[in-house]
Image (cartoon, coloured by chain):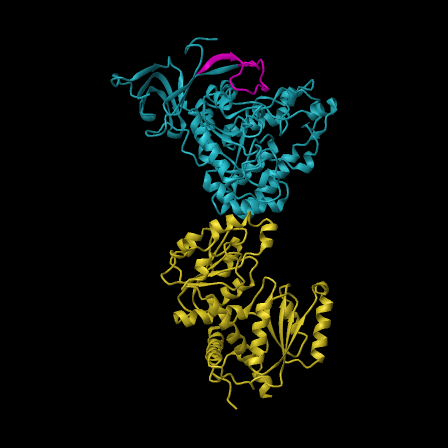
Chain colours: A cyan, B yellow
Amino acid sequence: MNTILFENIRIIDPANGIDQPGRLLVREGKIAGTDTAGAEGRPEGAQVIDGNGAVLSPGLVDMRVEIGEPGFEYRETIASAARAASAGGITTIAVLPTSKPAIDNPALVRMLRTRGEESGAITILPYGALTKGCEGRELAEIGMLHEAGAVAFTDGNRAVDPARLMRLALSYASGFGAMVVQHPEDPSLAGSGCATAGALATRLGLAGIPAAAESIMIARDIRLAELTGGRLHFGHVSTGEGIDLIRKARGRGLAVTCDTAPPYFDLNENAIGDFRTFAKFSPPLRSEEDRLAVCAALADGTIDAIASDHLPRDADDKRLPFAQAATGGTGMVTLLGVTLARVHDGTLTLPQAIALLTHRPAALLGSTAGTLSVGAEADLCLFAPEQSWLVRAGQLPGRAQNTPFDRRPLEGRVLGTWKAGRRVYEAGATAGAGA
Amino acid sequence: MADAPSTTATAGSGRNARHLLGLEGMTPDQIEPLLDLAESYALLNRSRKVPRDVLRGRTLINLFFEDSTRTRTSFELAGRRLGADVINMSVAQSSVNKGETLLDTAATLNAMQTDLLVVRHSQSGAPALLARKVDACVVNAGDGMHEHPTQALLDALTIRRHIGTLGGLTVAICGDVAHSRVARSNIHLLTTMGSSVRLVGPSTLVPSALGRLGVDIHHNMEDGLRGVDVVMMLRLQRERMSSGLVPSAREYFRFFGLDRRRLDLARPNALVMHPGPMNRGVEIESSVADSSQSVIQEQVEMGVAVRMAVLDRLTRNRRAA
């Protein structure tokens, strides 16, 4: 892997404002330079990769992934998650602490980081547990976790419920410059609900979760961030009213950020029709109006990042009556393709989409990944934005197969993924050919 | 009979004050003479030549609604050395939380012709409430999270004896400032005397609102200690962990404990102080607590002298009458 020259590519590097045809040179695992002037000549001994006009972008940075290891290896392991990530063009993943045991101990943070390095395919940025055991009672050792390399603090899909605890968390974490990531849902309002409150849930006889459960939690926490000076981020926002609150808070100059996930800008509540548990999410899939609000917020910059929200589940976790089935879907393999659907329909420009998948989430996590700057690790994603493929549950790379996008044709296919200059994924077909 | 030492103290409005409820609002020309008087008592204590008749025939009641062996003993010793009759009253915790009980107690003590009432209470403002209802001189021996004036005075005396001044210094007060009456009294005294104060600790214990007291806030121990003349450590109560303000003792020590490496960031020979009792290995490393820079034992000694000075000063008008 000494020297690699990518030719005949469209370089998209939003962090550096680059979107043009050119060549990119990798030396010793680092980006040695980009050439957009159309120069000829090749460095001696370079391995040449002809992109056939495909896009070369930074390797994707996925800021919300649950793996399952340690504790739930039957769902996914670090090795299988790495395969799914590579197939999705992802080279950096931020891993939720809701494993078993929870990542509430500095040794576990170091373990995850090391396991990522050992995989050779992904960088693992571990989240630290915000509370001990992610149980929502006492603060975890945030300082020591931060020192061990935890990039931010969260209890995953469990909302931090008591306002006093959230206040303490924001305040304490701010002393270490650490970000708190909240699951934006008021647990007492969500109750045992399993679908978005509305006509569909009523018709199906499912307990509903109102959109207000999200906006009330967001409103409360914005106020607490203001009170404490804490750094607050909301994971997977899904409602127009919640996003409006974030937009207004940012207008007042508050450092409040958020991400969303493909299900919330590509699907709506109708996907659960006929009690389809593979479309059961937390927060639940929302109304079409909310989906459009998420799209608008992606376009106007209110939403800072798109994360896969990859949540591996076993078939047995899902083949249950709807209310009893587990929430969540796999998402790494389909992250780019579903995001590009918003490019193809004109919601986002391609550089906007890539920014949401690379340097913007990286910046939130304090990572330098997600750019093609000279000297950066050569984490790269080569993809054909127009090439179509069909999502087939059961045939996705990685162990977990619980995708909500089964049988969905997607336009935008990852052709190759490189981690620190080493090729970790190669699509079966050659670039440029339709599938 | 030897007159009490330092009767040459200059006049000030505080000279005629009957109570010592707090240091907020006191001026340098009230504080300095009190420290001068305490200093002279410190010397007399060492030479065992204290005049025993200063408070002869006077009654001092230690009224402690909250247990504190150290402070109570210090006041008791101060009173006895000056010849007062000292009575210790520990009031059962169960009967505390009622304002009526407190005022009933005040009326009872008043009827007993008490001269000095030393009050420790878990509620901020309780000594002030008592002071309005009794004829005795009231000394606040610590009220809730409000003030502990004699502690700050003894800290000041200790600093002055070592550094020679209370002006122009930088003092770091580290730890659970939010719940500390010791910290508040020290902030008032040190800023009044022209020193600057840094508060250092996690933001759950050192909230930024404290910045309104005219101090600098630091959430990083290394930054907070750099170049300071004095390091005051505060006790971390166990209940701060159980109430979730601090994740664990080991994390606290890791980031906010005073160890040799951190102390070396302060000025060479910076003083190390602690109001006691210490949690070794939680807020302070044993070797630092016992080092030559530590003046913790001297603080205890100065405590008696400062309390003698306070008892003497407050009762002057009464004795002159």
Displayed quadrant of residue A215? top right
Q: Residue at x 47, y 50 (%)?
A: B255
**Which residues are the magenta region?**
A384-409
Q: Would residue B140 be counted in the magenta stretch?
A: no
How many numbered badges does the structure rendering display? 0
Q: Main secondary structure of the magenta part?
A: loop
Displayed quadrant of residue A263? top right
Q: Is residue A349 visible?
A: yes
Q: Position of residue A10 (x, y in %)?
A: 37, 19
Residue A17 vertical position relative to residue B111 in the rendered view, above or below: above
Q: Is residue A360 visible?
A: no
Displayed quadrant of residue A402? top right
Viewed as shown, does residue B293 lie left or right of A332? Answer: left
Q: Position of residue A173 (x, y in %)?
A: 51, 44
Viewed as shown, does residue B39 lie left or right of A135? Answer: left
Q: State the residue in front, A138 or A72.
A: A72
Q: Position of residue A256 (x, y in %)?
A: 52, 39
Residue A263 vertical position relative to residue B58 in the rendered view, above or below: above
Q: Residue at x 58, y 54 (%)?
A: B238
Q: State the residue in front, A369 or A121.
A: A121
Q: Would residue A401 be counted in the magenta stretch?
A: yes
Q: Position of residue A66 (x, y in %)?
A: 55, 29
Viewed as shown, does residue A186 lie left or right of B148? Answer: right
The N terminus of chain A is located in which quarter?
Answer: top left
Viewed as shown, does residue A111 lie left or right of B237? Answer: left
Residue B137 vertical position relative to residue A156 in the rendered view, above or below: below
